[in-house]
Image (tube, rainbow, N blue to C red):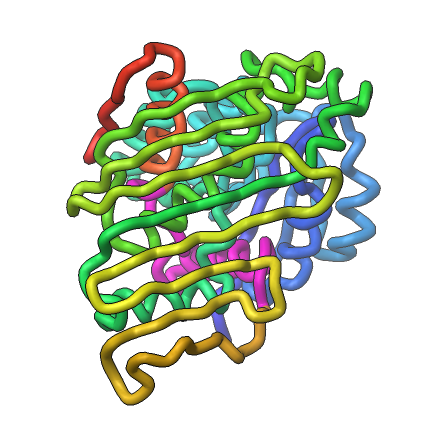
Amino acid sequence: MPEKIKVALATHAGGAHLGAYFSALAATDEVDSVALVDPSGQSNAAAKKALGDKLVATYDDVGKMLKAFQPVLTVVTMEAATAPPVIARILEGGSHVFAEKPSCVNAKDFQRLTALADGKHLNLMLALANRLNPEVQRARRLIEDGDIGKVYGVDMHLIADQTRLTRPAYHKTWFAKKDRSGGGHLIWLGIHWLDLAVHLTGAKVKQVAGFTANVGGQPIDIEDSAAASLQFDNGTLGTLTSGYYLDRGYHSHIKIWGSTGWLHLEQMKDKPLRWYSTRGKNKGQIQEFDGSKQPRGYTPFVQAAVRACAGMQEPPISNADSLHAIETVYAIYDAANKGHVQSVSMG
C-alpha cells in the first residue's frame, strides 16, 4: 500500500481555486488527513463538505497548525502580498509547500523562499498544472525524441475574457490591485504558457523584452494586456501574447517550430495537439493526438505533488522551474517599465 501523508491547506477569505484544491485532496488516496488554516473561517464549511472525514482539524493560525498537526505537505493559496512570510514559516516548520501562483509580488521574495526550501531539502512547487495534461506530455516526448529536430522558435497566445474585469465586485478584490497581486493577466495566466515553453523545449528563458497595458480601460491597476519577446539559452526565440480580450472563453495556442517539423498545441479544442515531422514512418504527414484529454487540471497535479512528498515519485515541478517561471514574469514587467531588454537569472 502507498504511504499516506498529512496535508494542510493555508488560505484566507478570497483564496483562489479553493474548490479545486478541496476536490483534489479528497480524490487523492495518499492524503491521510487534512488540516485547514483559514483565519476568516469562511472556507470551513466548504472544506468539510468536500473532504468529509479527511478534514480532521481547522485552525486560525499557521503556527498553531504546524505545532499540532505537523503536515508533510502544505498547500498555500493566498493573496500574493501576504503569502511569502506564511510560506517561509511553513518551510521553517519542515513542511513541503505547494503554492498557488504567484505567492509573491516580486521575484526577490520567491528567490528567498526557494533558497530556504533548497537549504532544507524541501519541495516548493508552484501550481502550474498544465504540465501534466496528456497532450502536453505527448508534445514533450515528441520534442525529446527529436521528432521536430532542433527547436527554432516558439509562439504563444493565451487570451481570456475581458468580462470579468468589468464587474465592480472584481475591482474590489486583491486580484485587481498590483501591490497585492503582483500583476495582472501575465502573472495569473500568461505564466502558465511561459512555464510550458520551458517545460516542453527543455530550454530556459535568458532575456526578455515586453510591453504591458490596460487596453480595456477598466478601473484596475493591473495589466489586461502583455506582449513579450523571449530569447532562450539554446538560441531559440519566442513570443507571447497574454491578455483579457474576449467576451467569454479562451483563445489559446502554443506553436513550436524545429529543424525537422513543428507542433501546435490548442488545449481548449477536442484535438488539442497536431504535429508534422520529416522523420519517421509518418514523415510528411500532419498527425493528431487521438488520446484522452483526461486526467487534467488541478487534481492530477496535486496528486503528483502529494506522491512526491510521500517519496513515491519526482515532483511535478522543481523548485528551480517554479522560481524560473516567477523570474521570467517579473523580468517582463521590468522590461516594460524600464523600456529595455532584461536578463533572467539562470539559477
Residue 95 image point, x, y percent: 44, 41
Residue 270's place in the image compared with 331, above or below, is below
180 and 163: which is toward the camera: 163
Residue 343's place in the image compared with 123, above or below, is above
Residue 273 image point, x, y percent: 48, 67
Q: What is the count of numbered marks? A: 0
256 and 24: which is toward the camera: 256
Which residue is pictured at 69% across the width and 42% down the height?
18
Which residue is pictured at 33% across the width and 85% down the height?
282
169 and 116: which is toward the camera: 169
Residue that extends furthest to the front in the rendered view of this protein = 284
Which residue is pictured at 52% across the width and 22% down the height?
183
In reply to whether residue 222 is colored magenta, the answer given is no
Which residue is pictured at 23% across the width and 25% down the height?
343
Q: Is residue 97 left or right of residue 48?
A: left
Q: Which residues are magenta?
A: 295-321
190 and 314: which is toward the camera: 190
Residue 208 image point, x, y percent: 29, 29
In reply to whether residue 317 is colored magenta, the answer given is yes
Residue 211's place in the image compared with 192, above or below, is above
Residue 28 image point, x, y percent: 60, 63
- Residue 335 shows in this picture: yes
Q: Is residue 181 left or right of residue 38?
A: left
Q: Is residue 83 left or right of residue 125?
A: right
> Which part of the image, by quadrant, shows the C terminus?
top left
Residue 221's place in the image compared with 87, above or below, is above
Residue that extends furthest to the left in the rendered view of this protein = 234
Residue that extends furthest to the bottom in the rendered view of this protein = 281
- Residue 31 shows in this picture: no
Q: Is residue 203 left or right of residue 82?
A: left
